[in-house]
Amino acid sequence: MSELDGGFERFGEELNPAVVDEVLGWERDKELGRIVRRLRSHANRKAFLDTYAEAMVARRLKARGCKLKFEVPTPAGRRSDFEVDGCGRRFYLHVKRIDTDRPGADVKGSKRLVAQSAKLRALERIARPYVVQVRWHDWLNAAQMKRLVDQAGEFIRQARVGDEMKASDADGRELGGVRVIAPWDGSHVNVTIGLPSGFVDQAPRFRRLMHRAYQQFMPRQTNVIVICSGHPNDVVECENGLLGSHIERWDAFPPVGKRVAHGRGADGFWNGQRYAASRFVAWFGFSPGDREAESRLWVRREMEVDGEMEDVLKSVFEDGR
């Protein structure tokens, strides 16, 4: 790349070369050429990746045959990131990126992670229908890991959604922790991995981004919020921010075969009639080095939804990568 490539030269080592070549090919496009020029101008990594995430979403839309306009003004003096014409339907897209600050691991660290997490399989034999997040310190030896698993198992067998515990050795030194984060449809525990330093609830951050996107809505049109982030577990955090925290409901009859009813708390972006103009939210698994991205679409079922629009959006955000 030449020095005229600005942000691409500064941050290009993080990016997929094939995607960069494709994006640079937009330069003469009346609308998407503006994204290229903006990417060239960025000296700040966060600003560059925010715009690059928009480019990745635009690339997905173009691949589905959609026509795009970039940064369309709204009557309120704000801007929608994209006006999209797809399959004869028009909608407005509002793209926000969040860095959830999960540390990466080198090859050696990855092998150790796999070896340690394999020991947690014993927890998945516990017959309780919960998603359980487990964290531990990377200095644990085999005996300490076994102690963590034993304490975690004892806790999980009597815990409820939202409960959390810390495991410790005989001297009281913390080994790790366990949190019951949600019910799920399986009959046994489903284990996920948390940060070594502690559990971080990212849902409020996702919710704040949804609020910011809502302020950019085009009145009386279909608006879609797209939240971009890089960790596979973020889809759960995004859903919790949108629908509300998982709670145990003692005011409702549990499903047949279940002893406890579960529901969502009142903290969700879509709770009740809150943000009533919002019908569609998508999560886009953005990572700078990837060529493609996982994605997920949520549809607000308790409100009237345009079925044809739903089909269009599913073709963008749910029909594979």
Image (cartoon, rainbow, N blue to C red):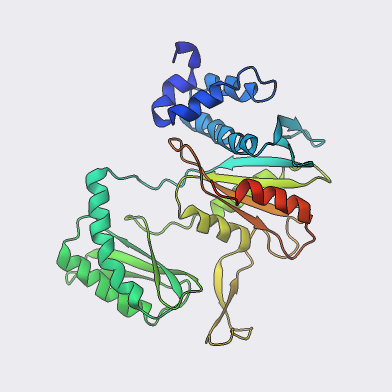
Q: Residue at x 16, y 64 (%)?
A: 142
Residue most toward the top? 3
Residue 91 at x, y percent in the picture: 75, 42
Q: Residue at x 72, y 65 (%)?
A: 272
Q: Is residue 70 left or right of residue 118?
A: right
Along the line of sight, which residue is nearer the eye, 6 or 139?
Answer: 6
Residue 203 at x, y percent in the picture: 54, 56
Q: Residue at x 43, y 56 (%)?
A: 200
Q: Is residue 127 left or right of residue 76?
A: left
Location of residue 321 with respect to 116 vertically, above or below? above
Along the line of sight, which residue is nearer the eye, 18 or 184?
Answer: 18
Residue 130 at x, y percent in the picture: 45, 73
Q: Residue at x 59, y 38 (%)?
A: 60
Location of residue 143 with respect to 279 vertically, above or below? below
Q: Is residue 61 visible?
A: yes
Q: Quadrant for residue 260, please give it.
A: bottom right
Residue 183 at x, y percent in the picture: 50, 73
Q: Is residue 302 left or right of residue 174?
A: right
Q: Is residue 278 visible?
A: no
Q: Quadrant of the N terminus?
A: top left
Location of residue 262 with respect to 57 vertically, above or below? below
Number of disc labels: 0
Location of residue 274 with respect to 184 vertically, above or below? above
